[in-house]
Each structure stands twice: as structure tokens, then as C-alpha cells.
Amino acid sequence: MTRFTKSQCQPCPDRPRCTSSRESARNVGFPPRELRDLQVRVRSEQQTPEWKARYAVRSGVEGTINEFAHGHGVRHCRYRGRSKAHLQHVLTAIAVNIERLSGRSVTAEASPPRPPTAFQTFLDQNQIPRPRSWRTLGS
């Protein structure tokens, strides 16, 4: 941690870009070298096509979890106890699956795919292969 005193910080020409505080000085923290090296390595790995393809799958899973948490109130249980809460979650998942399946027409062709997300568009623009659906990963 580096601490700048008020007398050091006030005359600095870059102060407005550094802090908006009028009274106090600035404290700047630096991570340990090992953590910094790890950050640099992980951030560079995140730019590879392989990592982006794996993350595209994760993004779909997180979207489903978000739907359950915000759309169906799974974070708040009606019942007390682990077994009853688990039963509520299972029944909610079954209801969501039925809702998704009932939206499909049996006689009509498959519904058109959803428009791609911004991340999927980025992968497509950069010719990075991505699985079209998480359901096709196991086959």
C-alpha cells in the first residue's frame, strides 16, 4: 500500500484523473508479485479462442441460472427445511421445462433460433468457433 500525503497529492497535475476527493490524499494498493503475475497470465488466456469458446457455454448456463433466480424466485423458498426447499427447486425446474416445451408447436417446424448475444456475435465476427447449443456438447 502506498500512501500519498496531502502535500504530495494536492499539487499533482494528474490529481483530477486520480481522485475526486478535495480533502484527502490518495492511497494506492499494489498486489503481491505472485498475484500480479497470475492476473497477467489469466487475462492473456482470456483472449484465446479456446477460452472464449468455453466461456460461451458458461454464459448460456449462467443465463439459465439467472432466469431461475430472477424470473421464478428460486432464491426465496416458501418452505423451511432443506428437503422442502430442494423439492421446491425441483418442481420449479420441471415447471420451467414444461413451459419451454409447451411454447413449441408440435406440427410446425422448429422455432427460429434466438438472436445471438453480443458475445456470440463477437465470436462469429472473429471466426472463433462456438457450439451452437450447450445440448450438443455431449454428442
Image (cartoon, helix red, strand yellow):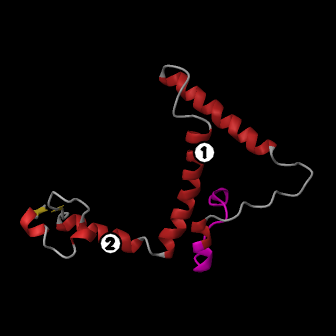
Q: Is residue 8 magenta?
A: no
Residue 131 inside the magenta-drawn segment: yes
Q: Residues within 10 Å of mark 2 (few under 14, many from 20)?
A: few
Q: Can you say which quadrant of the picture contains the C terminus? A: bottom right
113 to the left or right of 72: right
Residue 112 occupies which quadrant of the picture? bottom right
Residue 96: where, in percent of width, then height?
Answer: 69, 39
Picture residue at 15% right of the left edge, 74% below the top: 12
Name the magenta segment's main secondary structure: loop
Residue 20: percent from left, percent from top: 26, 62
- Between 1 and 139, the one lying in front of the other is 1
Question: What residue is shown with label 1?
Answer: 67
Range of residues picked out in magenta: 122-139
Pointers 1 and 2 in contact (C-beta within 8 Å): no
Residue at the location (54% across, 68% down)?
A: 53
Front one among 33 and 29: 29
Tag of residue 41: 2
Report the residue at 58% width, 73% height from top.
123
Residue 109 point in image, percent of width and height: 88, 58
Amino acid under disc 1? Glu
Task: Look at label 2 and name its amino acid.
Answer: Arg
